[in-house]
Amino acid sequence: MSVNVSYADEAAIRDHYQHMLDCWGDSVAYAECFTPEADYIIADGMIEHGWKEIVDGHNIIFSAWARNSRLIGRIESIRFITDDVALLIARGHIEYLDNRSSDGNKRTVYSLVAQRFEGRWLFAAYQNTPLAGH
């Protein structure tokens, strides 16, 4: 199967990934980085389905342990599965902005499925795994 993607597609996905990082702290804006029916699997294995559950789950963490934080991450790889679907592998962690220590924060590796949705790239799935030893 031949996949026809352009540099512009990869750049758009990288830009959208950065936008997702920048939306951290705003549960609605963060959820809107995903398709309306996205599956979001957090580190403890809980699954959030769709925008409402992603918003509700992030409202809880943004008012508790993730308050006053930002999400730091970097894409390690992007592999196009089809012209409209790509698999991303990334690494990241939470950085606290209110002088709490970030040292104990687990570093994670995660996968995202990017999908061209209504003419733009959004994430259709997210899965987060803490790295061993952190």
Image: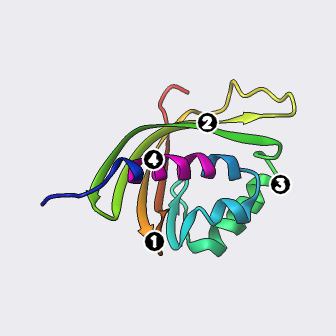
Q: Quadrant of residue 51?
A: bottom right
Of marks 1 and 2, the one in the foreground: 1
Q: CA distance from mark 4 to mark 3?
A: 33 Å
Q: Between residues 105 and 82, which one lies in front from this camera angle?
A: 82
Which residue is identified by label 3? 63
39 horizontally vs 77: left or right: right
State which region is magenta: 9-19
For label 4, the crowd category at 10 Å Cα-Cα, with few meaning under 14, some 14 to 19 and many 20 or more, is: few
- Does residue 84 appear to the left or right of 96 in the view shown? left
Residue where numbered disc 1 is placed: 117
- State the residue at coordinates (61%, 36%): 93
Q: Magenta-highlighted stretch: main secondary structure?
A: helix
Q: Nearer the N terminus, badge 1 or badge 2? A: 2
Q: Quadrant of the N terminus?
A: bottom left
Q: Residues within 10 Å of mark 2 (few under 14, many from 20)?
A: some
What residue would you read off at disc 4?
A: 11
Residue 7's place in the image compared with 106, above or below, is: below
Q: In the image, which is nearer the foreground, mark 4 or mark 2? A: 4
Horizontal side of 56 relative to 5 (left or right) equals right
**Of callouts 1 and 4, the N-terminal one:** 4
What is the three-letter code of the residue carrying label 2?
His
Quarter of the image with the C terminus is top right
- Quadrant in the picture for residue 84: bottom left
Q: Quadrant of residue 101?
A: top right
Q: Residue at x 59, y 45 (%)?
A: 18
Residue type at mark 1? Phe
Whether 132 is drawn above or below 122: the answer is above
